[in-house]
Amino acid sequence: MLNIAVMLNEKKERVIMGIDPGTAVMGYGVILEKGNKTELISLGVVKMTHLDDPFLKLQRIFEKTVVLMEQYKPDVLAIEAPFYGKNIQVLLKLGRAQGIAIAAALSRNVPVTEYSPRKIKQSITGSGNATKEQVAAMLQRLLNFKETPEFLDATDGLAVAVCHSFQKITAGGKSKTYSGWESFVSDNKTKVKGLTVKAKK
């Protein structure tokens, strides 16, 4: 009976989509969880730079997010929260962009989870102050891809998906919640062989 349970658990799959909302460029990433393993499905950006009307930008975000939902059929959407250190006008624009992406997901009955930028960076690199370049480099090593996206918004979107995956990874028939990169590494040494954890000062 135990072997059957393990086999069923190994076959369990979950598609996670991550979105880094923006009014000029929206980044997204899609990963597939297979038991303890995580695979990259896709990453890219949706550009709004050619649009001047802010409402047309929101319309494009909604329509493109719906298309991505229908294409990849994610089980959950993980989305980055607006960064509160930015000025109020930027914050309002990002909030609208995020809200539209969330509405698109909910219109397709896809549950949504939100993460702060600091939480995402902490989960991926072990440091909440990591740069976009450091996050991208770690994702390339974790998911074993060499292509460098044209926009770091793409890897930012992917980072949100991976962050969500790190929070609850099913292992041995039990759900395990990780508080961050360090605890994940300590439990998955074979999966992240060769990677080092930045020591806290």
Image: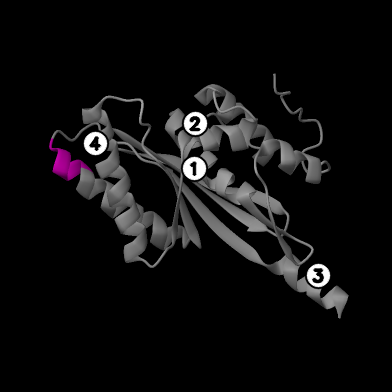
- Quarter of the image where the N terminus is located: bottom right
What is the distance, in whole Å, between disc 1 and disc 3 at their CAs?
31 Å
Q: Is residue 166 left or right of residue 6?
A: left
Would you name the residue on which mark 4 appears?
93
- Residue 122 part of the magenta segment: no
Considering the numbered disc 1 on the image, is that residue within a helix, a strand or a loop?
strand
- How packed is label 3: few (under 14 Cα within 10 Å), some, or many (20 or more)? some
Would you name the residue on which mark 3 appears?
6
Q: Which mark is residue 43?
A: 1
Q: Amino acid at mark 1?
A: Leu
> Which residues are drawn in magenta?
53-57
In the image as oriented, which residue stretches furthest toward the front? 201
Q: Are dots 1 and 4 in contact, CB under 8 Å?
A: no
What is the distance, in whole Å, between disc 2 and disc 4 at their CAs?
24 Å
- How packed is label 2: few (under 14 Cα within 10 Å), some, or many (20 or more)? few
Would you name the residue on which mark 2 appears?
149
